[in-house]
Image (cartoon, rainbow, N blue to C red):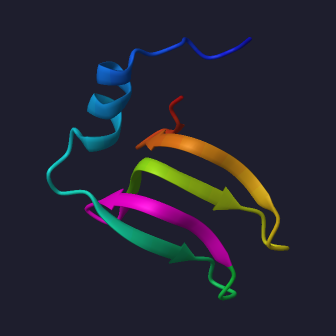
Amino acid sequence: ASPPILSVDEFLEVLYYDKYAIHGKFYSKDGDLAYEGYTVFDRPKGLGVSYYPNGNKHQEGVFNYKGLGL
């Protein structure tokens, strides 16, 4: 199923709603890039990309604390 289509205002609210969001990267215990994008309190939250251990892209979109949100 396709995600719901958001209005421009709804999209911007999802992306910029948290004043604590900063751009960051997370690495696995082996040093492989696991996530790159917006974070809040050292957790993915906002627009970002998650990666498999081999470096291939896993998911891209708007993340929340439970994973990919949109």
Furthest-front residue in this view:
8
Image position of 14 (left or right of 63): left
Left or right: where 20 falls relative to 21: left
Q: Residue at x 40, y 15 (%)?
A: 7
15 or 52, nearer to the observer: 15
Q: Quarter-wise, where is residue 6 in the image?
A: top left
Work out which quarter of the rendered image holds the N terminus and state it.
Answer: top right
Tell me which segment is drawn in magenta.
Answer: 33-43
**7 or 25, which is in the foreground?**
7
Magenta: predominant secondary structure element? strand
Q: Quadrant of residue 70?
A: top right
- In the image, taking residue 23 as reference, residue 57 lies left or right, namely right
Q: Name, please, the residue furthest toward the bottom.
A: 31
Q: Indicate whether residue 41 is drawn in magenta.
A: yes
The structure residue drawn at horizontal position 47% and vertical position 61%, both measured from the top left corner, is 37
As displayed, is residue 6 above or below residue 15? above
User: Residue 52 appears at what percent x and percent y?
Assistant: 78, 64
List x then y, in percent, for residue 60.
Answer: 64, 47
Q: How many numbered marks have been drawn onto this rendered protein structure?
A: 0
Residue 29 at x, y percent in the picture: 62, 83
Residue name at image x 57 percent, y 65 percent: 35
Q: Residue at x 85, y 73 (%)?
A: 54
- 67 in relation to 25, above or below: above
| Residue 32 part of the magenta-drawn span | no
User: Would you place residue 16 above or below residue 41 in this image?
Assistant: above
